[in-house]
Image (cartoon, rainbow, N blue to C red):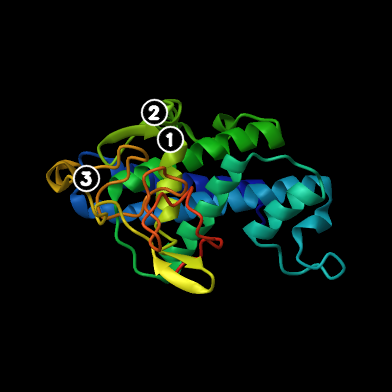
Amino acid sequence: MKLSLKDNAYDFLHNSLHFYHLATGEDYPDDYKRYWRFSLVDLVQSMELLFKEVLRQENEFFIYENIDKPGKTVSITKALERMKNIIKIDSSNSDEKVIKKAIGLRNHILHFEIELDIQELSTIYAILFEFLHNFHLNFLNEELHNYIRSEYWEEEALLIEQFRQEIVLYDGVEINKMFAIEMVESQMFPVYTIKGIEYKRVKFGEEVSNDPDWFDSLTHCSDCAVKKFYFHAIGCDSEYCPKCGGQAISCTCEHEELQDDG
């Protein structure tokens, strides 16, 4: 049996929605929350295959790592690079953040231990689903809905309702939905490097305050809304510089590009 790239992508999408249904269904036991990881991995796999379909429609050789020796197909990162550089598909910075976060999540789930934060996973999944919906319409010129089986229309509708709200609930706080991605992404960068020396970033709740009683009463950062003992979202006004103690985004310390701990 031979499946096209699109058919294969839609199969992974349906698997993802199936696991999403199991992970979110109120009638299922709490242990079913573990299916979140499968729903995310399959959603990213569907996205990767649809990227390759866009490349294939332009030129069938674009899906291969070596176009002179067709064999192994490109990775999702390479597919995105080729869509931008070869066929000049324009993607926004927010789109690229979503894609990179999706890649990182999939790799982490497949290769490392994972601690499930259900609210976090729910937010990320809705954002990725929105991106896939928009990508399909913009670059494959069809509504994704036309390819979703009717048995998953309820899940699709719930996700659409969630991602069409400009504000989402994240860790008990209402914030802009793209800020949620930035907060999750920020946890992957634990240090600032300043003139070759690594300084551990100051998490929200670890700062020295002139009014400790008031500060201790806070549960979330008033600027980026991250919860206590997590790293601030990158670019947050309230993050302290670990070297000088000033505002990280405006101090004179020469911060190098943030590095992850991998």
Q: Earlier in the sequence, mark 2 or mark 3?
A: 3
Q: Assign the N terminus to one quadrant of the image.
A: bottom right
Residue positioned most to the bottom: 196
Residue 177's tag is: 1
Q: Say what amino acid the circle numbered 2 marks.
A: Ile
- Which residue is labeled 2 in the image? 167
User: Considering depth in this image, is 2 or 36 the residue closer to the camera?
Assistant: 36
Q: Quadrant of residue 203?
A: bottom left
- Residue 1 relative to residue 239: left or right: right
* Tag 1 and tag 2, C-beta contact below 8 Å: yes
* Res. 55 visible in picture: no
Measure how far apart labels 1 and 2 are at the Cα level: 6 Å
Distance from Cα at disc 1 to Cα at disc 3? 27 Å
Residue at the image position 34 percent from the left and 58 percent from the top: 202
Left or right: 177 as drawn, with respect to 61:
left
Disc 2: CA contacts within 10 A as few (<14), some (14-19) or many (>=20):
some
Near-viewer residue (148 or 92) = 92
Residue 227 percent across, percent down from the top left: 27, 47
Q: What amino acid type is highlighted by mark number 1?
A: Lys
Q: Amino acid at mark 3?
A: Tyr
Instruction: Decide: few, some or many residues near mark 1? Use Cα within 10 Å; few <14, some 14-19, many ≥20.
Output: many
Q: Position of residue 43 (x, y in %)?
A: 50, 49
* 209 horizontally vs 261: left or right: left
Q: Residue 132, how many percent across, how many down? A: 56, 40
Residue 172: name its quadrant: top left
Give coordinates of residue 63: x percent, y percent.
75, 57
Reading the image, the residue beneath label 3 is 28
Mark 3 secondary-structure assignment: loop
Foreground of the two, 157 or 1: 157
Q: Which mark is residue 87?
A: none
